[in-house]
Image (cartoon, rainbow, N blue to C red):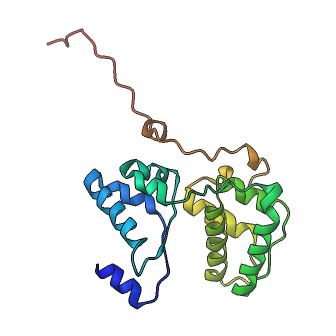
Amino acid sequence: ELVRQRLSVCGVCVLWLDEAQDVMRSGSEAEVTKICNTLKTLCKGDHAVVVILSGIETLATLPKFDPQIDSRFSKLWLDEVAPGSDAKGIWRLLQAYCAAAGLETPPRGDLIQRLFHSCRNRLGKSIERIVDAIELALFNGNTALTIDHFAQAYALKEGCRSNRNIFLVDKWASISTDRTDNPEELFPRRKRRKSSNRKGAV
């Protein structure tokens, strides 16, 4: 009730909750159900607001906790970005960000293609990486944004060697960006020593 009152006093018409998949991490079905009821309550009454939930794919499982959520909310899936359809728009965005930061725009070349590949074709990640590169350029006191800033930003976030850096190598498209969920692939288990049935000499 306090939330509804505050939203009304502030004149809020739209409430956007990003990373909304986190509501399901409590591990308690009862807790998630309470949150679903709260969301439904916000959407009705004299001071109803438009509720927007955004997040990763696991957010799509939220309606299983409350079928009314499924009927009340429209769903919109954002496709992955692709060089053929989205490169021009992202390049214009990069130019606008550079202008706002007072930096010269880097040579275009295949920068956007490398960017998309490094971000697994995710729009949000691509924008974040542009911002990270610009921050590095400003921190270093540079006047121009270069592909080296993207390489630094990628290395810091991904923890990769230079020969696996998509912004540094020539055959960048052959570098896999899939992350494994198997810790043994990241940290191979040491092989156990074969036990010997022979007893040591006394």
Q: Residue furthest front?
A: 46
Residue 91 is situated, as x and y percent measured from the top left of the image, at: 79, 69
Looking at the picture, does residue 61 appear above or below residue 54? above
Residue 171 is situated, as x and y percent measured from the top left of the image, at: 78, 47
Q: Nearest the camera: 32 or 137? A: 32
| Residue 118 in the figure: left or right of residue 15 | right
Quarter holding residue 7: bottom left
Q: Is residue 166 visible?
A: no
Q: Is residue 69 visible?
A: yes
Q: Nearest the camera: 184 or 83? A: 83
Residue 186 is situated, as x and y percent measured from the top left of the image, at: 48, 41
- Write the residue at 75% across / 47% down: 173
Q: Residue furthest left?
A: 202
- Write the residue at 80% across / 62% down: 87
| Residue 123 in the figure: left or right of residue 51 | right
Q: Residue furthest top?
A: 198
Looking at the picture, does residue 163 appear above or below residue 187? below
Looking at the picture, does residue 10 appear above or below residue 167? below
Q: Nearest the camera: 66 or 170? A: 66
Residue 45 is situated, as x and y percent measured from the top left of the image, at: 39, 76
Q: On the rendered image, what quadrant is the C terminus found in?
A: top left
| Residue 29 in the figure: left or right of residue 75 | left
